[in-house]
Image (cartoon, rainbow, N blue to C red):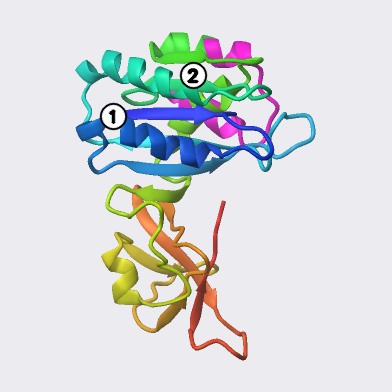
Amino acid sequence: MVFVGIDDTDIVGSPGTNQLARLILRRIGALAQDAVICRHQLFFDPRVPYTSKNGSASIQLPKAVPGDIPGLTTAIREVMLGWFVEGSDPGLCIATGATDEMMAFSQRCKCEVITQEEARVIAAHADCYLEGLGGTQQGIIGALAAIGLVVGGNDGRIVHLSWWPYPEDGFSGCQDIEAIQARGVDEIRQAQSELPVTSGVVDVGKHLRPNRRGGRIILYVEPNLGPDSTAAWRSVKLL
């Protein structure tokens, strides 16, 4: 398994980081098989530069091995440099896992202002690839954090599984639980109680966006109290 983290790749009005992650998958060929893209919420604070809500993205590549990293690095750098827009500050991280120090760093990135120097030191200790690819290079912080968060297995909103069509095919609105599970969701749970939901119809909203918890793909829901809905449940997009 190889993990890729990217952050701060866009500006207001330009395509976002999730779109870039999907483009990377299209460019790396067979290594994109079974890939998962997650969005990770970082510290949302005026002291932290961000385009919209300060999210970074991780890409899990289950078919990649350490020997693939040099070629992956070259290919992903080329994609990101070609994508670069003035005013963005992109960062790229590539690793085969996360040290305890990386994991602790990633959790701090969700609630503290972090410096680039901290990110560089921690990446050097972990012997993982970390590089800024333009602007102030501030995106290295979120790129490194994305890997720590996804390796931890309890963070991230899934925005793409390799078998989901892209552009998305209209899997939205009211859906049977069986159809949701067929899209790769391991379990549906009530957001407040964590109790499983095994029957009924779920309004998944505009797009299916489950979360990653315990290394599994979980869709969180709450009772749908809207008087005009035919669905008993509606999805909840947790951060």
Amino acid at the residue labelled 1: Ile
User: In the rendering, at what x and y percent does residue 201 appear?
Assistant: 41, 82
Would you name the residue on which mark 2 appears?
Answer: 81
**For numbered disc 2, what is the local secondary structure?**
helix
Amino acid at the residue labelled 2: Leu
Q: Magenta segment: does it hold 55?
A: no
* Distance between mark 2 and mark 1 Cα atoms: 15 Å
Would you name the residue on which mark 1 appears?
Answer: 28
Say few, some or many: other residues with alpha carbon within 10 Å of mark 1 (under 14 / 14 to 19 / 20 or more).
Answer: some
Q: Look at the magenta stretch and give its main secondary structure.
A: helix
**What label does residue 191 carry, if any?**
none
Stretch in magenta: 99-120
Q: Magenta segment: does it hold 114?
A: yes
Q: Nearer the viewer, residue 115 or 52?
A: 52
Residue at image x 49%, y 29%? 6
Asked whether, in this view, residue 77 is left or right of residue 88, the answer is left
